[in-house]
């Protein structure tokens, strides 16, 4: 039975593997979940022909306001966030599927200013990052001392730019990059989103102190492997708290996005509870910080979440 309420209007920007999956889910399951697909935009509009109803195809991203979306989901490329993210926020809340875009400090500032000006929220999907909530809680408690994310897959699964594009896999397993996540994102924009999500989940370390490692492994023809290693403060015996997670995500040969990530993205649109879009604000912390108090009738101040759950991306909340 369809939900007896006004549906949330959702626009999708990007029609690659993630975009195709989201559009399919929205068309088949959206009405029952209170979600209405109102447009699909792709850099190459020809890819939409015969796959997306003509009435839903948006030819010019600048015209998205005419569709009156409540939420725009970006699953295209970091450049879309850098070039159009602020404009999207003028009309709707924004779910960022390419968080590597936020490694660019100018882009981060633009989104912050646009979010405050238009009172729309920015959300960040965690994608392939396992243990986001635990990382965020440990960081908020002041106990996160180091965080390292290693992503390994077959060389055909990388879409590299700049100096990394010329990097050669010299053997069965080659480390292409090891260093701060901020330095990796511009040259591996489509392969560093998991690391960018980690940097956002751990703001005490951020893009400059979370370490990203990109590995080309010729044996990984059908999976992406993500290892997350973190350490905390030493205990009474001097031994430090440590966690190491190892995630094997099945993937088609040469694919940028693993199968489990596609499923996780659909869940990003749904509330943790019965399946409705959750609120676009951080109500628990409204007025918690100096200068942020709001009257009873004031609109909620937007924030940034991972996978639409109330994850604090800084000591309190990342107020956007």
Image: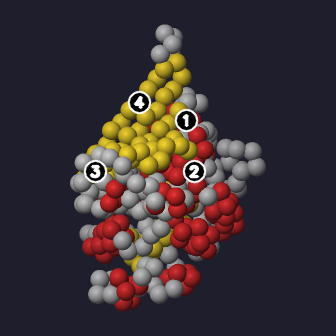
Q: Residue tagged by mark 4? A: 243
Q: CA distance from mark 3 to mark 2?
A: 26 Å
Camera-side mark, 1 or 3: 3
Labels 1 and 3 touching (C-beta < 8 A): no
Q: Quadrant of residue 4?
A: bottom left
Mark 3 or 2: in front is 3
Q: Tell how many labels.
A: 4
**In the picture, which quadrant includes the N terminus?**
bottom left
- Residue, disc 3: 218
Query: At 70% from the left edge and 44% from the top edge, which residue is drawn?
Result: 289
- Say if 90 sits above or below 245 in the image: below
The correct choice, above or below, for 60 with respect to 96 in the image is below
Task: Determine the CA span between mark 1 and mark 3.
Answer: 35 Å
Residue carrying label 2: 182
| Depth check, front residue: 141 or 127 | 127
Q: Using a 10 Å C-alpha cutoff, classify the residue at mark 3 as few (fewer than 14 neighbours), some (14 to 19) or many (20 or more).
A: some
Q: Any mark on residue 139, and which?
A: 1
Q: Which numbered circle lies on residue 115?
A: none
């Amino acid at each position: 039975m369809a939900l007896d309420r006004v549906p949330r209007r959702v626009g999708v920007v990007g029609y690659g593997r993630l975009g195709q999956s989201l559009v399919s889910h929205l068309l088949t399951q959206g009405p029952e979940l209170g979600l209405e697909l109102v447009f699909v935009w792709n850099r190459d509009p020809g890819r939409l022909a015969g796959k997306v109803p003509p009435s839903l195809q948006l030819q010019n991203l600048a015209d998205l306001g005419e569709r009156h979306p409540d939420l725009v989901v970006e699953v295209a490329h970091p450049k879309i966030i850098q070039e159009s993210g602020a404009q999207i926020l003028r009309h709707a809340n924004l779910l960022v599927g390419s968080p590597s875009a936020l490694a660019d400090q100018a882009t981060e500032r633009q989104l912050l200013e646009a979010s405050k000006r238009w009172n729309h929220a920015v959300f960040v999907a965690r994608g392939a990052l396992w243990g986001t909530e635990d990382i965020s809680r440990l960081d908020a408690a002041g106990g996160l001392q180091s965080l390292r994310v290693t992503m390994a897959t077959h060389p055909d699964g990388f879409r590299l730019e700049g100096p990394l594009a010329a990097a050669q896999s010299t053997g069965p397993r080659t480390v292409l990059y090891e260093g701060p996540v901020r330095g990796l994102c511009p040259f591996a924009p489509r392969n560093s989103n998991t690391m960018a999500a980690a940097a956002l989940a751990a703001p005490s370390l951020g893009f400059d102190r979370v370490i990203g490692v990109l590995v080309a492994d010729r044996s990984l023809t059908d999976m992406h492997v993500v290892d997350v290693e973190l350490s905390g403060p030493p205990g009474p015996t001097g031994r430090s708290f440590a966690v190491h997670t190892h995630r094997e995500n099945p993937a088609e040969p040469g694919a940028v996005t693993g199968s489990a990530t596609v499923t996780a993205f659909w869940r990003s649109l749904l509330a943790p509870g019965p399946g409705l879009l959750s609120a676009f604000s951080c109500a628990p912390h409204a007025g918690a910080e100096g200068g942020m108090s709001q009257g009873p009738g004031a609109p909620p101040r937007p924030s940034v979440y991972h996978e639409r759950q109330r994850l604090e991306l800084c000591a309190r909340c990342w107020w956007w």
